[in-house]
Amino acid sequence: MNARIPPHALNTTQALEQVSQKWDNDIVGQLKDYIAIPAKSPMFAPDWAELGLLDTVLRNAAAWVEAQKVQGLKLEIVRMQGRTPVLFFEVEGTQPNANAATSPTVLMYGHLDKQPEFEGWRSDLGPWTPKYEDGKLYGRGGADDGYAVYASIAAVQALKSQNVPHPRIVGIIETAEESGSRDLLPYVDALRHRLGQVELVICLDSGAGNYDQLWLTTSLRGMASGTLKVEILTEGIHSGDASGLVPSSFRIMRQVLDRLEDSATGRMLPASFHCDVPAERLAQAKATAGILGDATYSRFPWAHHDCGGSTLVALPTTTDPVQALLKRTWEPTLSVTGAEGFPTLQNAGNVLRPYTAFKLSLRLPPLVDAASCVQEMKRLLEDNAPYQAKVTWEGLSSSSGWNAPGMTPWFEGALNAASRAHFGSDCGYIGQGGTIPLMNLLSQGFPKAQMMVCGVLGPKSNAHGPNEFLHVPYAKKLTAAVAQVIAAMPVTKSETQGEAAAV
């Protein structure tokens, strides 16, 4: 279905040329400077306030936005005591007598805090040493998603340069997303009267199935995380003296985790951690599997080794493309993301360790309540510990997932038109395995808003891991596509009615 063409439609070729120049001449340089600053999220840098790095990247972004001299734009850095700061900007709509209370509004979102370094970077790369190579900008945070504020303003500039009518636009750029957006709700509450009537949310913190079309994120998994610790001794003991009598804390850890997960299949055992996949999402997964095929699983950096003259490659849990998509978006999965209580291999003597601690990350289906799962995990993991060991499940955090609302005709048409204009094919639809806590909040606060959740994290971009990169050619097209969707948004009741009649 096609959306009504607005009377002052955006010239898509001109828009892409403009944003491409902006990326080449300005934004890439800004992002190089941003990547070089280790502005880690508060979860990974508890002394963030003393370090001042989150403040630095936010002030740098604010200074750049101000320097763009976008007509009708106002911005400020908003601070609350004891919380990470946010950047808030507002661009006046072009409609006569538009005001914040009643005007249809676009909300643009991104974040500037980063994940920690991680190991395994290519020898000529590093998390804080930006490198631009073959259209890819390497370094931590550029794609996830320091680019968002720069791309958002570049999209607005594309509209302004062609005098295309546009709705009122506001933006929130936070600095604690990688810590679960723990500070965001108080800011949203404080700014709610300035957000206005949000009818379109553009979140640039998501992924792409490939770099060949525009991708809309249709769902996000929830997450429950914490530290599981098993203590059996008060200090380490010679393993020759104690092993066999003193049970290994690691073996107890395995037994406790067996209550939660079938280690043979990876299936989570509690029934409440699962939910049915909606029919619409299943149909979209089948369509996306037809587009991506084996790339749904082959895109990951699988380990390989020689065996009897042949090379064996590690295998995924499934090679069925539909199941591959559903497993990483609609099934609960447990990961151990950190460990404590282990000496390094070089320093590992013959000692029975007193404790084992694992950082657990449980990804949950979009429709499952994460807070309830955390409490169920506490009961499952702590009660009736083997050998009466001290087992604790602490440091808990949770965020429920998100399932996108239904699309209106204008929005679906605008997405397809933008994807065809800049990529030559219709928009693709894909669930994401990650979590963006803001989306549930916005869906609850603005239940009628359309949600354009998209991003540049395509194949091998490897956010959070080594060799993270931003695919600049794709980012250029995404920026232009964002401008086109904003231009297509109905801004009055009569337009919305006309759109419905025209479809």
Image (cartoon, grey):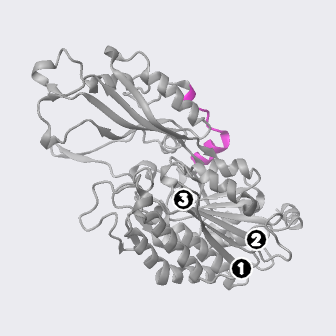
Residue 89 visible in the shown view: yes
Does the magenta segment cover residue 286?
yes
Task: Classify 10 Å Cα crowding around label 3: few (below 14), some (14-19), many (20 and above).
Answer: many
The foreground one among 10 and 121 is: 121
Give yes or no for contact between labels 1 and 3 (Cβ–Cβ under 8 Å). Answer: no
**Quadrant of the image containing the C terminus:** bottom right
> Disc number at residue 362?
none
Tell me the residue at 87%/66% (across/down). 498
Give, as a three-letter code, the residue at label 3. Answer: Asp
Which residue is identified by label 1?
72
Task: Classify 10 Å Cα crowding around label 1: few (below 14), some (14-19), many (20 and above).
Answer: few
Task: State the CA–CA distance, disc 2 to disc 1.
Answer: 12 Å
Give, as a three-letter code, the residue at label 2. Answer: Pro
Range of magenta residues: 272-287
> Disc number at residue 167?
2
In this view, the residue farthest toward the front is 81
The mark lying in front, picked from 1 and 3, is 1
Which residue is identified by label 3?
205
Residue 405 visible in the shown view: no
Q: Position of residue 411 (x, y in %)?
A: 73, 61
Give yes or no for contact between labels 2 and 1 (Cβ–Cβ under 8 Å). Answer: no
Q: Earlier in the sequence, mark 2 or mark 3?
A: 2
The foreground one among 341 and 267 is: 341
Tell me the residue at 67%/44% (across/down). 280
Q: Position of residue 235 (x, y in %)?
A: 21, 27
Task: Classify 10 Å Cα crowding around label 2: few (below 14), some (14-19), many (20 and above).
Answer: many
Q: Position of residue 89 (x, y in %)?
A: 65, 70
Residue 214 sits in quarter: bottom right
Give, as a three-letter code, the residue at label 1. Answer: Gly
Q: Earlier in the sequence, mark 1 or mark 3?
A: 1
Element at label 3: loop
Secondary structure, magenta segment, majority class: helix
